[in-house]
Image (cartoon, rainbow, N blue to C red):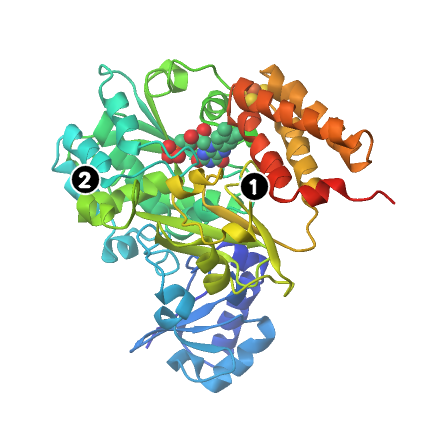
């Protein structure tokens, strides 16, 4: 019998030795004359258990981890191919507490299937959404996405259906679907995990988007730092094309949709949608003035959908199971699920997909099990480098767009970076200004000049030079950047600075030795 053994090809697992473990398993099986079929799956997102090796048994998949090359002979000795006991045995994978309590819709197949096998994808419910979409009118598809309540997962949380409707309403012409896979926020990896673990779901979502708005060409704008995602996407696109899911006649429907991956140029600002379009056109990543909106005049001046990976990958399940099914998850105006990414000083980092409404405390302590250092957690930064710092006193805030906005924070792309009580918040405020100064595209003055002045002011504050007056200037500068910047980079840099000033004022007034 050919036993299936799963070892992730995900970048996190690979960085922890999954490639070497996979090779060792193959060697050991050969040496013992055993037949094992190695499947290189995505990661389950339980990073503290990587490399997580799974074996398909008659009772379902059993997990072992974290596995090193040295553990491999003893795993064979213990009979891991039959799911038998071993010190690294974690039991049935689906019963692992942190996984069992999740509500995986977008990540339902990640870690389960062979990411580049169309057969495996279809066997696990893939392409059901596209098949339903092909039987619907473009307007009905767009309505379903609107009704689901899906809002953009890239950061701005704009309703996806409304964006699509604007593109659909433009007169017939060359239109485009672009996927923003730049994933520049600190502590985020959901896009990467999805593209490495279930790229066909993104491809299916983009195909549905194209059919919905009458776009025949799609581009995935992928950051160059994601070589494993690049490979997985290209393999999956070729497999989808070979099976008739992409091309000039999608599933014999007479509809056309083609897809290509374009590598980004390595600047944070290239994740901002208009800069991304400039970069896709082969120009320097610089923000465009709006209006016109990309939905009206986007890539090469044509109507263009710009959506994040997770937004697009949420579409197949909405079409397959219906808008109401998706909408039933979540709270208030935050419908569906959100893949949260827990990183920084945390014991159990990884990806947690849950319906909106989970509290920060539940995320950090129930899933994350506290700080990696064992020290008290002082703050979390939610939503990337431009997100606010949230103090421990507000950890009972629900993770949804409105609740976070009510405390002056934002969810962004769902990244949560944890800091313990050794963090210097004045240093973090300075870092926010420095980050903005380095990454500014230079188009508008409040950001280009303001961020550099911000670093200088913070240096004076830290050196206790005319401190109170300089702190006042920092506040005024934040106000100018907030209201005067052309895009979110300059416009949101004040969030980490102001939140640090508000919740951790003592850090700005330390005695200089
Ligand atoms: C400075 C800056 C960086 C951004 N980086 C990203 C990014 O890496 N990925 C992303 O999807 N959206 C990013 N965004 C948001 C995009 O501009 C845009 O709102 C998003 O791609 C739209 O897709 P969505 O509606 O599906 O979220 C960024 C925005 C700003 C202002
Ligand atoms: S805010 Fe900064 S990044 Fe955005 S347009 Fe202005 S200079 Fe460019």
Q: Quadrant of the C terminus?
A: top right
Q: Which residue is mark 1?
A: 225
Residue 256 appears anywhere in the view: no
The image position of residue 497, as x and y in percent, is 62, 35
Residue at far front of view: 468
Q: Which residue is mark 2?
A: 251
Tell me if mark 2 has few (under 14), some (14-19) or many (20+) residues whose alpha carbon lies within 10 angstroms of its own: some
Tell me if mark 1 has few (under 14), some (14-19) or many (20+) residues whose alpha carbon lies within 10 angstroms of its own: some
**Mark 1 → mark 2, Cα distance in angstroms:** 33 Å
Confirm or deny contact between disc 1 and disc 2 (CB under 8 A): no
Q: Secondary structure at mark 2?
A: helix
User: Which residue is painted at 42% across and 46% down in the image?
Assistant: 195
Quadrant of ligand 2: it is top right
Q: Is mark 1 within 8 Å of ligand 1?
A: no
Q: Judge left or right: residue 123 versus residue 78.
A: left
Q: How many marks do you count on the picture?
A: 2
Q: Judge left or right: residue 324 versus residue 345.
A: left
Q: Judge left or right: residue 461 versus residue 496.
A: right
Front-most of residues 193 and 367: 367
Q: Quadrant of the N terminus?
A: bottom left
Residue 25 appears anywhere in the view: yes
User: Which residue is painted at 65% across and 63% down in the image?
Assistant: 373
The image position of residue 216, as x and y in percent, is 28, 26
The image position of residue 117, as x and y in percent, is 33, 53
Q: Is residue 268 above or below residue 115?
A: above
Front-most of residues 284 and 490: 490
Q: Secondary structure at mark 1?
A: loop
Q: Is residue 404 above or below residue 92?
A: above
Q: Quadrant of residue 481?
A: top right
The image position of residue 300, as x and y in percent, is 40, 16
Task: Indicate which disc, 1 or 2, sits on the residue closer to the N terminus.
Answer: 1
User: Which residue is painted at 27% across and 50% down in the image?
Assistant: 329
């Amino acid at each position: 019998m050919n036993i299936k053994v799963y070892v992730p090809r995900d970048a996190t697992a690979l960085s922890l030795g999954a490639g070497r473990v996979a090779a060792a398993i193959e060697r050991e099986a050969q040496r013992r004359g055993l037949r094992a079929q190695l499947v290189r799956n995505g990661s389950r997102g339980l990073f503290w258990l990587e490399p997580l090796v799974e074996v398909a048994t008659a009772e379902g998949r059993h997990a072992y981890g974290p596995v090193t090359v040295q553990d491999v002979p003893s795993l064979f000795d213990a009979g891991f191919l039959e799911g038998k006991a071993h010190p690294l045995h974690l039991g049935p994978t689906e019963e692992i507490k942190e996984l069992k309590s999740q509500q995986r819709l977008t990540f339902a197949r990640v870690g389960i299937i062979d990411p580049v096998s169309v057969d495996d994808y279809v066997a696990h419910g893939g392409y059901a959404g596209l098949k339903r979409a092909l039987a619907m009118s473009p307007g009905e598809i767009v309505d379903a996405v609107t009704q689901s309540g899906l809002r953009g997962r890239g950061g701005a949380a704009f309703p996806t259906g409304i964006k699509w409707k604007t593109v659909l309403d433009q007169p017939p012409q060359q239109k485009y679907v672009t996927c923003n896979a730049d994933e520049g926020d600190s502590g985020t990896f959901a896009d990467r995990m999805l593209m490495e673990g279930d790229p066909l779901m993104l491809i299916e979502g983009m195909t549905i988007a194209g059919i919905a708005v009458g776009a025949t060409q799609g581009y995935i704008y992928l950051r160059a730092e994601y070589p494993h995602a690049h490979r997985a996407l290209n393999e999956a696109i070729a497999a989808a094309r070979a099976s008739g899911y992409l091309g000039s006649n999608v599933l014999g429907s007479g509809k056309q949709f083609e897809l290509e991956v374009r590598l980004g140029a390595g600047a944070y600002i290239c994740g901002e949608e208009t800069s991304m379009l400039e970069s896709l056109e082969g120009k320097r990543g610089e923000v465009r003035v709006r209006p016109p909106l990309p939905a009206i005049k986007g890539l090469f001046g044509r109507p263009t959908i710009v959506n994040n990976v997770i937004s697009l990958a949420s579409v197949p399940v909405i079409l397959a199971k219906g808008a109401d099914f998706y909408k039933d998850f979540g709270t208030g105006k935050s419908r569906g699920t959100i893949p949260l990414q827990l990183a920084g000083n945390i014991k159990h980092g990884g990806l947690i997909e849950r319906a909106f409404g989970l509290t920060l405390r539940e995320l950090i302590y129930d899933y994350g099990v506290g700080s990696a250092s064992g020290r008290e957690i002082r703050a979390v930064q939610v939503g990337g480098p431009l997100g606010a710092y949230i103090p421990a006193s507000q950890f009972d805030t629900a993770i949804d767009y409105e609740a976070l906005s009510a405390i002056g924070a934002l969810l962004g792309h769902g990244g949560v970076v944890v800091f313990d009580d050794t963090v210097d918040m004045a240093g973090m405020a300075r870092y926010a200004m420095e980050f903005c100064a380095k990454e500014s595209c230079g188009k508008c003055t409040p950001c280009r000049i303001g961020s550099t002045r911000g670093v200088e002011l913070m240096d004076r504050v830290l050196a206790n030079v005319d401190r109170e007056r300089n702190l006042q200037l920092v506040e005024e500068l934040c106000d100018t950047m907030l209201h005067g910047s052309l895009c979110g980079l300059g416009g949101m840099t004040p969030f980490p600075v102001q939140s640090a000033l508000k919740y951790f004022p003592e850090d700005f007034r330390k005695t200089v030795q």
